[in-house]
Amino acid sequence: MQNITAFKEYLNKSRKVVVITHFKPDADALGSSLGLSGYLKKKGHAVTVITPSDYPDFISWMPGNNEVVIFQKERPQKAKQLIADADTIFCLDFSSLNRINDLGEIVGASPATKVLIDHHLEPEKFAQYEQWDGTAASTAELVFQLIEELGDKSLIDVNIANCLYAGIMTDTGGFRHSNTTHKVFKIAGELVALGANPSKVSKLIYDTNSIERLRLMGYVLGQKLKVIPEYRTAYIVLTAEELKNFSSQTGDTEGFVNYGLSIKGIKLSVLISDRKENIKLSFRSLGNFSVNDMARKYFDGGGHRNASGGQTKLTLEQTLEKFLSILPEYKEQLLAEEN
Ligand code: 5GP
Ligand code: MN
């Protein structure tokens, strides 16, 4: 953080804090938020984590989960009141206010001091203090670095360490994606030294499937995964009815998009699903192909170069048509050979 001395000074006074993360939080969003919140509480601040929406069961084991205020679920009034009373708003794992949906306007208009901790590309400027790094693999590692910069690494306990480790593990795809750097291993290693338990966290996140989710996955891989070899592209389209037939819960489709990318020769993979409120797209790519550019230009979204998301208000069929119609524009990039 550039103005770390001023920030340290700012935190010398006890603050009323809300920590907000993005719609449908994933393990990095929730883990970084709860990890930061655990730390700030130890420093004597009053802290509440607010999420715009619910999140999957496989991250609800995180310490502090019981105190999270879910804007959509609880009376929205509660979240609004907490934001109105806050003197400090931390924004974690997102950097454009539309990622927190209805809360975006409220946070934007709030006179509270804002602190951004994030690693998404092309951030909006709305915070007084920023711990932003577009090359970081996860927001959790940025929280770790901030605590370190504040000279408080010794305050990281087992609970905080497990939350932050979970964020790093999932945003690197289990230490497999191209963002898995020396720094990632170094910080993950430090977290383990501070008490994080890799096998426990990995079991809680990756190996707590419901049988319905596995059946849905079988159906998707068997019948719904399509390949367009001439564009080195794979896609999956899921209707609301299909999701309902498999009693799909929040998070059940997490990771499906990676199967498309796991096919030899495939460079771009997308999952298009009908989420009732909108059509949601989840993109993954390999190498220099930027799904961030594609999601931003055509699907009102963004994210990272190799992992992005977006949405449309079109029908599911129209969304697929739109996606297929833009592929020729990207043909050259999709077919380019890379080492
Ligand atoms: P996922 O496909 O796992 O939902 O998201 C992949 C990445 O893109 C995550 O870093 C996520 O925060 C980001 N992302 C997902 N959906 C959207 C969206 O609608 N807009 C923007 N700006 N980013 C998104
Ligand atoms: Mn993240």
Image (cartoon, helix red, strand yellow):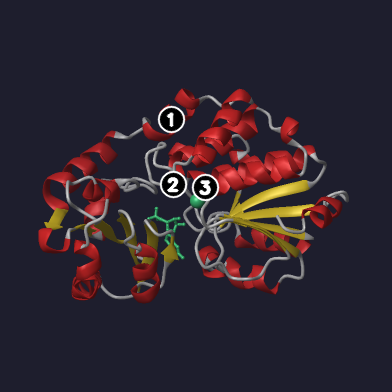
Q: Specify the amino acid type for callout 1.
A: Ser
User: Label 2 vs label 1: CA separation?
Assistant: 18 Å
Q: Which residue is mark 2?
A: 179
The mark lying in front, picked from 1 and 3, is 3
State the SS at label 3: loop
Quadrant housing residue 306 = bottom left
x then y, percent, for residue 301: 42, 68
Local crowd size for mark 1, using a 10 Å CA cut-off: few (<14), some (14–19), many (≥20): some
The disc, 2 or 1, on the residue closer to the chain's N-terminal end is: 2
Residue 79's label in the rendered image is none
Q: Which residue is mark 3?
A: 138
The answer to whether residue 60 is seen in the rendering is no
User: Label 3 vs label 2: CA separation?
Assistant: 9 Å
Q: How many marks?
A: 3
| Closer to the camera in the image, 131 or 113 | 131
User: Label 1 vs label 3: CA separation?
Assistant: 16 Å
Going 49% across and 43% down the picture, which residue do you hit?
27
Image position of 210 with respect to 285: above or below: above
**Seen in the image, is 258 located left or right of residue 127?**
left
**Seen in the image, is 160 located left or right of residue 254?**
right
The disc, 1 or 3, on the residue closer to the chain's N-terminal end is: 3
The disc, 3 or 2, on the residue closer to the chain's N-terminal end is: 3
Going 25% across and 37% down the picture, which residue do you hit?
214
| Closer to the camera in the image, 222 or 241 | 222
- Considering the image in quadrants, where does the N terminus appear? bottom right
Question: Is the residue under label 1 in contact with that under label 2 (CB below 8 Å)?
Answer: no
The residue at label 1 has a CB less than 8 Å from ligand 2: no
Q: Specify the amino acid type for callout 3.
A: Ser
The answer to whether residue 52 is seen in the rendering is yes
x then y, percent, for residue 178: 39, 46
Q: Which residue is mark 1?
A: 202
